Image (cartoon, grey):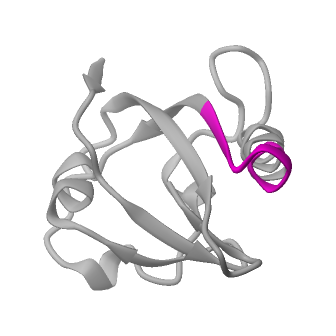
Amino acid sequence: FDYSNSHFPMFTYSDKIIWANDAALKFFELDDIDQVLYRRFEDFAPDIQPDGQSITAKIDFAINTAMKDDSAVIRLQFYSQSQRFKYAEITVKRLPEKFLFMF
């Protein structure tokens, strides 16, 4: 398992990824931003996380917390293009627009 502590901003709107930087592409072992655009975080993660919670429940919790408190931190397991599991601590920040979040 790999753990990334590098920062890779990704922006979402209506639960779709609308932007990601090169560090995000490297983390997921992707070659092109088109491989991530308009997909959901759930597309890159096991349905059930190691703590037994669903990925959807964890992301929903983080978004709801960020809506109230401006930010939230969660730890998620993802898989890369080579199907290796990786962990990332994700900070979800609410931006001024109502449905725009930075992960």
Could you say where residue 5 lies in the image, as x and y percent from the top left? 27, 28
In the rendered image, the vertical position of residue 99 relative to residue 54, given as above or below: below
In the rendered image, the vertical position of residue 28 relative to residue 3, given as above or below: below
In the rendered image, the vertical position of residue 48 relative to residue 65, given as above or below: above
Could you say where residue 68 lies in the image, as x and y percent from the top left? 86, 49
Residue at 42% over, 81% down: 37
Q: Is residue 102 left or right of residue 46?
A: left
Residue at 60% over, 32% down: 73
Residue range of the region highlighted in magenta in the rendering? 65-73
Residue 62 picture quarter: top right
Residue at 38% over, 73% down: 36
For this rendering, which residue is in front, 68 or 48? 68
For residue 67: magenta? yes
Could you say where residue 45 lies in the image, as x and y percent from the top left? 54, 44
Which quarter of the figure is the N terminus placed in? top left
For residue 86: magenta? no
For this rendering, which residue is in front, 43 or 60? 60
Residue 20 picture quarter: bottom left
In the rendered image, the vertical position of residue 10 relative to residue 76, given as above or below: below
